[in-house]
Amino acid sequence: MTGTTPPSLEGTCKLLPGPRHDLLAAVSEAYERLVATHGSRVLVLKRHPAGLDALAETLANVETAAGVARSPRVESLPEHASKTIEAYDPTLDRLEYEERIELISLVIDGASRDVPDYLERAARHESFARDVGQLLLAATRQRLRLADLEEPHDCLAFLYAMNDRFHGVLEDRGFVERADVIPSSVSLLEDDVEGVRSRVTDSFDAVLAVEFEEYRRLDRRYLAALTRDADLVCLAERHGSVERTRVEPGSIESIATDAGLEVERLEPDAERIDAADASDAATRPPHDAITQYLATGTTPSMDEGAEPPDSEAGRARRIRARTAREQVRTVAAEIQSLTDRRDWSYDEIAVAVPRIERVPETRRRLREVGIPTATVGTSSLAEDPVVNELYAFVTLQSRRTRGDEPDGLEDTADDSLERLRARVPEFSPSLLEACTDASVERSLERWIRRTDLKGRIARDETWVDAREQFESVRRVLEIARFVEGTDLVAPDWRGLRRMLRRTIQYDAPYVHAVETRPPTGGITVCAADDLKYDSRSAVFLLDLIDEQYPGEQFLTQLFPQAWLREMPNYPAVTDPSTAEIGSTFAPVADATDVADPFESYHAQRARRRLALASRAATEVLYCCSYERGSGGLRRTYEESRYLKLIESTPGLTLEDVDADAAAAIHGEAGAIEALLEEPRGELERVLREASTGGTADLAETEELFQEIAVVLEEGEIDPELAEAVRSQFEFAAGEVLRDD
């Protein structure tokens, strides 16, 4: 990397006043002006890939004096940087995630430095490998090296040293890590290595940098090197940065000004406000005031000389449930109600969770109660039946090459044989032999063909599940191909089993691409951050509890929060000043009153995430939460502090959705869950009445319980289900405690 001077950008930064529901219209307007001048030679660069398809589709419909701007060139910044590296050296290989896991594990295992005691103890925790992986990815993206740091913490010094050694090994082997794509391409463009800059920039005359509020320091350096001979227009939203503010504080105005851009504030035209007010109010979502309050702290009554706020100035709906499972079930019932009442398709609805790791479970629970989902690409390898089948095949082949006889495979301690027999009815040890080849990759391909694995997937799975399982097959074959072509592991069954086991163990959804608009339709289930450039008629924000928004542990679980406050070399903001908090986040009216700058700073980032996710709803916003009690009947709501702030603000309203309202039950799983909830729900109703001095109708309760008893005794009920219903009476009575 050449130099550490801040990037110098020449161009304009068009600055939107804050999150707005017509964001794509603003992008279209800026694009239209550039196309009018430069024709089709306009490159649109968006910082993050989420929402890229929706943006491209919108820009494809932009009309200019010359007609519709067909086939706009829209790319994410990482994608474009990757092409820059390919233009320099087409032979460079990008390191796949699975390969990274194996290589960095070998580097750490072979470390000559003493491992700090704390890291040795932390390594026993299940999340250790993922936490370390995320830290090193963040350090790589910012090109933080041990030699550049002053007096780093012992643990950080060890991890950065391993990261430096890891990248040295990559360079020797001709690999480039995905997290290193932007830093590496910055060096290539700034130094114009072998004339690569002209080869990359010959195809455009102007660049529209979208989502500029999220461009980090190295991103801005890339943009500066890319646009030395091109017109540059940046489009940014005030109060819109979540990812950039993780690693650098400051408002987007100051960032743009310091970079040398001419800032053009796109404030509403005062002369047109009155004329446009009626039409704008008609298109503005009913919860728009809630979005603005979360983003800026502005309430409906804060404008000077304004009338007292209407109670309907900002309105959203609220779902409050007893458990996380019941939260999803209530959301499913409300989704079905929306599609019935408003004739909406499932494609018009999104369900957003705090973290991408929550997507697979949420999607599965929605499907169980009959709601089709569309999200592709976040399944865990450990839960994929296809991966488990192929891993069992690899395990047995490894034992065969070790010398075990086919009949001796029956004595293995794991369940590999049972797993294959359950998946492949015609399985036999002779089938293993028939699939054996000198190449592990060809052996896997034989198994896939002979057992008709892809055919089984296509016949037995839904389109979304089949898509993911086909991708899993590709990943396993890619790992086998890597094993045979590297000297990192032995090119045999033992080497493949080891690498596949590591990949399954350390696999993390956050590193994989997510597709939320596949052709089959269904509701989108995604992380809240992925909705920033998306829009749906209805958006359900799940898990709005204080443990998630703002959260109890910021940045990482790897180190105690008290340590992070004392780690200036950690690859994120750990010691913000009160002035930086005030300049970065508008809701902080008086930063001098902040008791804990670290917690306050990152709590404000969580608040902003909620604001941006809420903006995606064009018709109705649902805020959903659940209780976190440890069991029994007495539970306590721990709603997010931001919901409580909304509820206490004049002019903002949260309209409760009755979680027990009569709604159609969809799917067998939904019917079973409804039955299982009856005993607990009824006894909780009685307890609530008693605790408030009311009178509960026990005759009604007795009648309900008698009906359930008759069904259990006389109906054709599975014995295990009947026992499960009986256990609910024990749970509700407090005889057995469970942790939801």
Image (tube, rainbow, N blue to C red):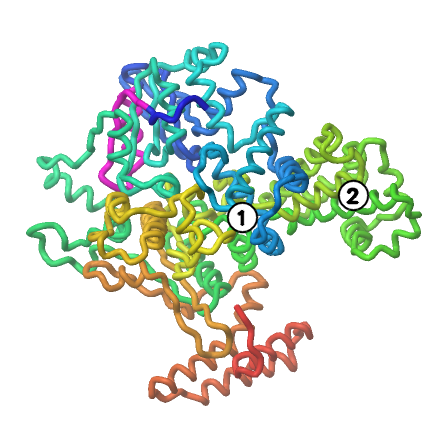
Name the element at disc 2: helix
Residue 289 versus residue 125: which sits nearer the camera? 125
Q: Secondary structure at mark 1?
A: helix
Residue lying at 8% horizontally and 50% vertically, measured from the top left: 304
Residue depicted at 54% across the width and 31% down the height: 178
Mark 2, residue position? 394
- Which residue is the extreme one toward the left? 305
* Residue 695 coordinates in the image, percent (x, y): 36, 89
Pointer 1: what residue?
131
Neighbour tally class for label 1: few under 14, some 14-19, many 20 plus, Cα within 10 Å? some
Q: Callout 2, which amino acid?
A: Val
Q: Residues within 10 Å of mark 2 (few under 14, many from 20)?
A: many
Residue 452 position (above or below residue 123)? above
Disc nearer the start of the sequence (1/2): 1
Residue at figure coordinates x 50%, y 73% from the top left:
630
Left or right, 450 with respect to 679, comes to right
Which callout, 1 or 2, points to the residue nearer the camera?
A: 1
Query: Disc 1 marks which amino acid?
Result: Asp
- Please indicate, yes or no, whether residue 462 appears anywhere in the rendered image: no
Instruction: Answer above or below: position of 402 versus 552.
Output: above
Give how far across and how far down residue 587 sits, in percent: 24, 51
The reply to whether residue 404 is in sight is yes
Which quarter of the figure has residue 723?
A: bottom right
With respect to residue 566, does 329 lie above or below? below
Tally the numbered discs: 2
Q: Pick whichever, 123 or 610, lies toward us.
A: 123
Instruction: Determine whether label 1 and label 2 are within 8 Å by CB.
Output: no
- Where residue 639 sits: x, y (%)? 37, 64
Magenta stretch bounds? 8-34
In the drawing, does residue 249 fall left or right of residue 589? right
